[in-house]
Image: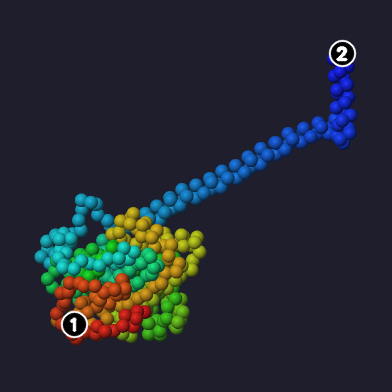
Amino acid sequence: MDNRNRNRNVQRHSEQEASYYGFSKDVTKRSSKSKRKLKKLNHLKLRLIFGTVAAVLGVIIGLAIFGVWYKEYLLNQITYETTSPNEVATIIDEYGDTVVLGDLTESTQFSIFQDEPVKNFLLIGIDSRSKNYSKDGKGDRSDVIVVMSVDSKKGTIKLLSIARDSYAYFPGYSKPHKINAAMSYGGPALLQATVENSLRIKIDGYAYVNFSHMAQIIDAVGGVYVNMTSGEKKVANQYIRELSKSAALIQDTGNGTWLNGTQAVAYARVRYVGNGDYERMERQIEVLRSLMTQYMKLSATKKLACMDDVLGAIVTNIDKKDVEKYALDFLPSLGKAEMQYIQLPIDGCLNQGTYGGEWSMRVNWNAMIPYVQEFFYGEKYDFDPVKLPPKAPELSQCKTDIPLEKLIH
């Protein structure tokens, strides 16, 4: 059989075999086409998957870049009063000489106790209505003096409010003065040094806010809620009218009274109702607590929106990189943050009255330091006694056995 007949027979045999197994010539061709289509479909799926992954990665990278930019934007809203490495903080002493504040730090036998997760910040509220007020914080008034102790490990905030009429010695001055006068003599740096010396604690930085800016911050979070009495309402409305003839007056009283920024600042300034400075400090802390509560209730978008107003009102000596670090350390635990508060001077640790024609509180700081230590750090430790102002009670005359729990609000 020649080759032509042999090939013809093989082809015929293959066709018969395909027919026997249920296939045809056309089916075989269609199978080949299906394989090609399936291959194209798989390529299309891979392109879609890779395209989707690339798009998601692009969004993530874009958000990351935006997040970095926005973080920088927010941090840049703060006014920083940090000094360069070659600069040092100075004040004018009682003799009119410019002196380095660090050189006035007294030597002590016992080192100041520090706990790494705990950072203490001095919060100062200043009133720009003072004729001597200046942008560097110097002026006649520091109406709010609060030490905020933040524990990033436990997620707690502890507030220590100091009465502005408490007598204390300032670094660089031989005579004691009301502690709020430190702002007039040397600005917030001198006030910080005075608080550190008087309480034997480390202050990691200060931040001060003008009362008018505080009103903006409160409005940014939607106002605050307080427990308003009729007497407080009357005095607060008088303060409001001093500031503006058109501002809305407070209408309601009772627990849960809503106040806008201007009204809340006026309420926090009320002094001669109730127990003088003590209740005034309680009003200030009440406003701060409500401010924090209202902020935490905001959505993430609204929190970001109000940060411009909040951060733009703050002046601080804390370095920008440290502000970022503190925020990263503490903000993750802020959602469950517990806020506690005590006020100084502690009842039984002072004499108050008119001395030398001036009403003041003559405080025994040494009697209160152990309470501050226990409040901030949970333990007491040895410290060098603080020089006390004239007319302050002796330690033996002070109440030093009051349980800390009774002082916490």
Helix, strand, or loop for circle 2? Answer: loop
Instruction: Tell me which corner region of the image, top left, top right, bottom left or bottom right, holds residue 237.
Output: bottom left
* Total number of numbered discs in the rendering: 2
Residue 41, horizontal then vertical, whole percent: 70, 39
Q: Front-most of 149 and 271?
A: 149
Determine whether, in the image, residue 383 is placed left or right of residue 272. Answer: left
Mark 1 in CB contact with mark 2 (< 8 angstroms): no
User: In this image, 219 relative to 271: left or right?
Assistant: right
Outermost top residue: 2
Instruction: Determine the CA span between mark 1 and mark 2.
Output: 130 Å
Image quarter in which the N terminus is found: top right
Where residue 79 appears, x then y in whole percent?
Answer: 32, 57
Q: Position of residue 176 (x, y in %)?
A: 16, 74
Residue at the (39%, 63%) spot, across then down:
330
**Residue 294, percent from left and from top:** 45, 70
What kind of element bears circle 1?
helix
From this view, report whether residue 233 is shown above or below residue 103: below
Which residue does the numbered mark 2 point to in the structure image?
2
Q: Amino acid at mark 1?
A: Leu
Determine crowd level at label 1: few under 14, some 14-19, many 20+ residues with C-alpha closer than 10 A: some
**Which quadrant would residue 354 be assigned to in this image?**
bottom left
The residue pinned by badge 1 equals 395
Say which label, 1 or 2, has the lower sequence index: 2
* 42 up-or-down from 70: above or below: above
The C terminus lies in which quarter of the figure?
bottom left
Locate residue 20 relative to residue 361 in the image: left or right.
Answer: right
Residue 249 visible? The answer is: yes
